[in-house]
Image: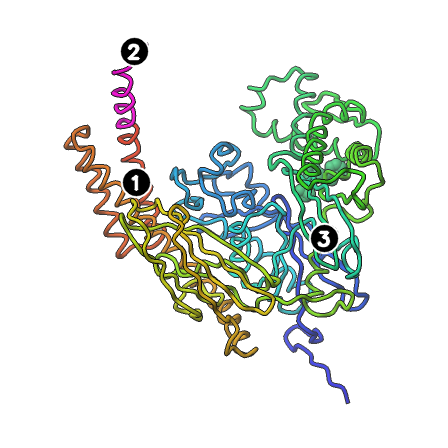
Amino acid sequence: MAKIGINISTGSLQQKEMIVGIDLGTTNSLIAIIHPQDRNPVVLKEFSGNALVPSVIHFGNAHQISVGDEAIPFLLTEPQNTIFSVKRLMGKSYRDIQEKASFYTYKIIDDNSDSLVKIQVGEKFYSPIELSSFILKELKQRAEHILKTSVTKAVITVPAYFNDSQRQATRDAGKLAGLDVLRIVNEPTAASLAYGFGLKSDVNKTIAVYDLGGGTFDVSILSISGGIFEVLSTNGDTYLGGDDFDHAIVNYWMQQLNVSADELKNNKSLSQEFRLKAEEAKKYLSTQEVFDGKLKELNISLSKSEFEKLIHPFIEKTIASCKNALLDAGMEKNEMDEIIMVGGSTRIPFVKNQVEKFFGKPIHDNLNPDEVVALGAAIQADILAGNNKDFLLLDITPLSLGIETMGGLMDVLIPRNSKIPTKASRQYTTQKDGQSGIIISVFQGERDLVKDNRKLAEFSLTNIPAMPAGLPKIEILFLINSDGILNVNAKELRSGVEQTIEVKPQYGLTDEAVEKMLKDAIENAKEDIQTRALVEAKTEARQIVDVTVNFISKNNKILSEEEIQVTQQAITELEKLIETGNKDEIHSAIEKLNSISTPFAERVMDEAIGKAMKGKKV
Ligand code: AMP
């Protein structure tokens, strides 16, 4: 007789664990599954019928967190405590984003360095990984509430242009939220799967995916061959989208109503009223010819043709991106077999027409453009669960592979579940002046500290010619062949010195051992990530102390006694905290030392320039 299990606390029937698909978006996030009965992909909706969870996080007085619709009103009333667009910060340093720093209304620490950004809310510091994990945790809880079962496994999508560290950051966010991230999938790949392209392993197709959302635009050219997706090129603008259309409408009405820019700037609620009305008009014009409404008690209107004129320059820009993407892929527009539309702004008929006109063929737009990526992620999750027989499952790495870096941290080069054969490389450098060798320790596993992972091999790269710290470029290359053998190569690129070693990653590991390592990683994720953050803060602090001490000894003639003393005091405080402080205290002390030393550094620079100019004759 067949038996079924019933979960006594929830009353639900126990089913095979579900793997969910997650679209972790810049503006909105969604979660989708394959319906167990009809086997179709569906997005999970709250009773209210809402599937979109705004990717917004608000921190209350005691740092209690709210995510989604609840957090939205605080964007206006408490901008410093309300985080939006965190996806744009994933894997980025302050230098990467400084040109757009005014876009963010919350505090991003300006450390003028290449280390990853930190966001300050009150006295606490958060990484984009932690912030994204709050969104993922909320999605996980919603899914569990709707499905009445626990959700621990997920596929998460990222833009095709995300680099290695942005992908790793997304994985870490999932882990921190208690999710085993089985795979990171490109958003255009997910969209293609949602339309059924690439599901039969024998199709060969070239696909253009046009994704125009609220704040970002990208276009990707994909090729599918034998069930394998390859991104041939991607292009776009990470600050172009529906929000720009809303702005254009606001400007148009400001002229009509004679409202000055200053008036809007000084009146937040009026500016919000304008913006919301503009978005309402824009959406209305996706199905109607003329929008009529009221602003400040005055009548306003906008016709479809006026709206199209306003957004025309933006759409032209997206078409130019399509041309560039084709150029980079080495293809002509008539070679595209399918054109797929993704993102809320592709509901605008003018956008559809222009894209159709450019490619010279009908587009695919019958799926909800907000949901299509999440639906595809659910299909990918189903394939990984082994439920979809139309799809060929490729050999994958069961655990992540990486090397040990400063402070005993695991730096992953090849994430788990990567298709093999595969390769990955990253550059490192030395810590000490004249350092002639480095030890490379190769590890396998999902934990943040190498001591909790499995050591596979260790070798050293020697005979590096003497150079100042930070100057050597040591490239570590991991290459896994189709038999699962890992070759690790280390090469100092300036001198050409190199060394290779062969490792068998899976040797001696049973399925149960792999399972256990994964379980441990999820269970310890929170402490692991906290330890990693502390180790990283300490490493950063040590580097800043070194640089500052060096700076003072070189420039002590330019600095006053008092300046040296104040700096020295900040250094001593930071050194004490390196031994005993927590991550937030260390970051605050780094901030303090930076704010003391930056003006000195600028002055020294000015003097140096002054001296250099003196000798020159014009
Ligand atoms: P996404 O980032 O993909 O969620 O897209 C959100 C953007 O789509 C926002 O700028 C919305 O204003 C826009 N949007 C949503 N629905 C419509 C519609 N019916 N017509 C025009 N734009 C829309």
Q: Is 537 located above or below residue 5 in the figure? A: above
- What residue type is disc 3 on? Ser
The quadrant the C terminus occupies is: top left
In the displayed structure, 367 sits above or below 317; it is below
Q: In the image, residue 227 lies at what x, y percent?
A: 74, 59
* Sequence-earlier tag: 3 or 1: 3
Quarter of the render that holds ligand 1: top right
Inspect the image, locate mark 1, and give the three-letter code of the amino acid beneath it. Lys
Write the start and end of the magenta stretch as one range.
Answer: 603-618
Name the main secondary structure of what is drawn in magenta.
helix
Q: Which mark is residue 592?
A: 1
Image quarter for residue 146?
bottom right
Residue 48 - label: 3
Which residue is nearer to you in this view: 486 or 295? Answer: 486
The number of numbered badges drawn on the structure is: 3
Residue furthest front as drawn = 496
Query: Which secondary structure lies at badge 1?
Result: helix
Q: Image point 49% across, 37% down: which residue?
A: 97
The three-letter amino acid code for the residue at tag 2 is Lys
Q: Nearer the viewer, mark 1 or mark 2?
A: 2
Q: Horizontally, is 603 left or right of 319 in the view?
A: left
- The residue located at (39%, 68%) in the rendering is 451
